[in-house]
Amino acid sequence: MAGNRKAVGSKGEGLAAEFLKRKGFRILERNYRTRAGEIDIIARKGDTLVFVEVKTDRSGQFGPPETWVTPAKQRQIAKMATWYINSKRIMGVDLRFDVIGISFKEGGREINHIEDAFWVPG
């Protein structure tokens, strides 16, 4: 079951990356990992660096997947973003946190991209 969930998540992340490319984003990283955790996609559009959390749903039982990003997960993503920016010595860009929810439904899929989905103070 867990392997299947991982495969669904990986497929969702691939679809999200292609979706972002079509919207003019440049994908910088996928599955960026450190000891602190992982960010699904790091992308850039113009002067904005975007950290994207992707949630993929195949059952429809738990509400829209884009609503699944908890405050704890938001803080972890922000910590990872800080780590990334510092390690790459990135300066002079705007930052944004987006969430992409992908729902597999009969006959296809639905992609919901929420820009500026959350803000983490500090």
Image (spheres, grey):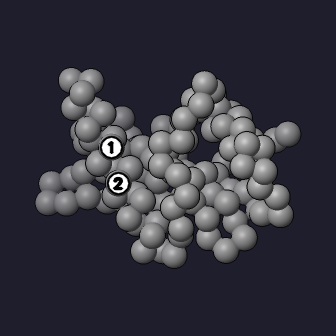
Q: Is residue 6 left or right of residue 99?
A: left
Secondary structure state at the residue bearing disc 2: helix
Residue at x-position 53% and y-position 69%:
25
Which dot marks residue 10? 1
- Name the kind of residue labelled 1 in the image: Ser
Quadrant hosting residue 80: top right
Residue at x-position 67% and y-position 74%:
46
Q: Return the x and y of residue 114 as percentages of the image width and height.
A: 54, 58
Q: Nearer the viewer, residue 71 or 88?
A: 88
Secondary structure state at the residue bearing disc 1: helix
Q: Return the x and y of residue 33 as percentages of the image width and height.
A: 54, 35
Placement of the N terminus among the 4 image quadrants: top left
Query: How many C-alpha atoms fall within 10 Å of the one at disc 2: few (<14), some, or many (≥20)?
Result: some
Q: Nearer the viewer, residue 122 or 40?
A: 40
Which dot marks residue 14? 2
How far apart marks 2 and 1 lie (CA) works out to 6 Å
Q: Return the x and y of residue 32 as percentages of the image width and height.
A: 54, 41
Q: Is residue 45 left or right of residue 23?
A: right
Q: Are marks 2 and 1 in contact (CB under 8 Å)?
A: yes
Residue 20 can be seen, yes or no:
yes
Outermost residue toward the left in this view: 107
Residue at x-position 21% and y-position 52%:
105
Q: Return the x and y of residue 53 as percentages of the image width and height.
A: 52, 46
Q: Nearer the viewer, residue 36 or 73?
A: 36
Placement of the C terminus among the 4 image quadrants: top right
